C-alpha cells in the first residue's frame, strides 16, 4: 500500500511539473473554439438542445468529438442573445491517466493556470486569456460508482457575455 501511495505521489508530481515547466511553447487561450469566435451566430448544422443560465444550448450534428486526444461525450455550444458565449466539453468515465493527459495538454496549449487544485477526488484548473476576455475552467471528479474513473468538464467562455447571461439579462 505504501509503495502504491509513493507511486501515486510521484505521478502527481510529474503531472504538475509538466504543467508548470517550460511554458515558452504555450500559446494564448483563444477567443472562441474550433474557428468560431465569441458572438458568432449558431451554425446551420447545429440543433437546439436545452436552455440553462439564460443561454440556449446547441450541439453540432456529426461533429468530431475528439478534443485533446480524448473522445468527448458531448460538446455543447452556449448562446446568449444569439451569440456564442460558452463552449462546454464533457467526458464521462475516463481513466485517471487519460485525464492526467488532458491537464498536461491544456498546460502545453494555454500555459500555466492561474488556479490549480488537486484533492483526492476533485481536480480543477482555471486559465484566463492575456486579453482578459476569455476564461477556461477544467473540473474533474472521481466517480463514486466506478472507482478509478473520472467525470470531467472543460468550460471555455467569454467572460462578460457569461456574466450578463448569469445575471439574467435576457436571451
Image (spheres, helix red, strand yellow):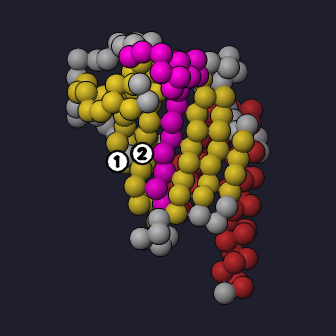
Q: Secondary structure at mark 2?
A: strand
Local packing at callout 1 (Cα closer than 10 Å; few below 14, some 14-19, many 20+) is some
Residue at the extreme bottom of the image, as rendered: 1
CB atoms of marks 2 and 1 within 8 Å: yes
Compared to residue 27, the image places residue 123 above or below, namely below
| Residue located at (48% from left, 51% from top) | 152
What segment carries the magenta color? 150-171
Horizontal side of residue 7 vs 69, given as left or right: right
29 in magenta? no
Residue visible at 41% across and 50% down? 91
Q: Residue furthest front?
A: 168
To which residue does mark 2 refer? Answer: 90
Decide if residue 152 is on the left or right side of residue 120.
Answer: left
Q: Secondary structure at mark 1?
A: loop
Q: Which residue is mark 1?
A: 73
Q: Quadrant of the C terminus?
A: top left
Q: In the figure, residue 130 lies in which quadrant?
A: top right
Q: Where is residue 119 drawn, in percent x and y?
A: 67, 61
Q: Residues within 10 Å of mark 2 (few under 14, many from 20)?
A: many
Residue at the (51%, 41%) spot, across then down: 154
Amino acid at each position: 500500500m505504501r509503495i502504491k501511495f509513493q507511486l501515486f505521489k510521484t505521478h502527481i508530481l510529474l503531472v504538475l511539473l509538466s504543467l508548470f515547466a517550460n511554458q515558452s511553447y504555450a500559446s494564448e487561450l483563444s477567443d472562441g473554439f474550433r474557428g468560431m469566435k465569441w458572438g458568432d451566430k449558431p451554425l446551420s448544422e447545429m440543433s437546439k438542445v436545452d436552455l440553462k443560465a439564460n443561454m440556449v444550448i446547441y450541439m453540432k450534428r456529426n461533429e468530431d468529438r475528439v478534443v485533446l486526444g480524448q473522445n468527448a461525450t458531448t460538446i455543447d455550444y452556449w448562446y446568449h442573445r444569439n451569440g456564442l458565449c460558452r463552449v462546454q466539453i464533457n467526458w464521462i468515465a475516463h481513466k485517471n491517466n487519460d485525464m492526467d493527459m488532458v491537464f498536461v495538454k491544456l498546460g502545453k496549449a494555454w500555459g500555466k493556470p492561474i488556479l490549480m487544485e488537486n484533492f483526492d477526488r476533485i481536480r480543477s484548473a482555471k486559465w484566463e486569456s492575456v486579453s482578459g476576455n476569455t476564461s477556461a475552467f477544467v473540473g474533474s471528479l472521481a466517480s463514486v460508482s466506478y472507482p478509478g474513473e473520472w467525470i470531467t468538464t472543460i468550460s471555455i467562455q467569454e467572460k462578460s457575455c457569461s456574466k450578463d447571461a448569469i445575471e439574467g439579462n435576457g436571451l
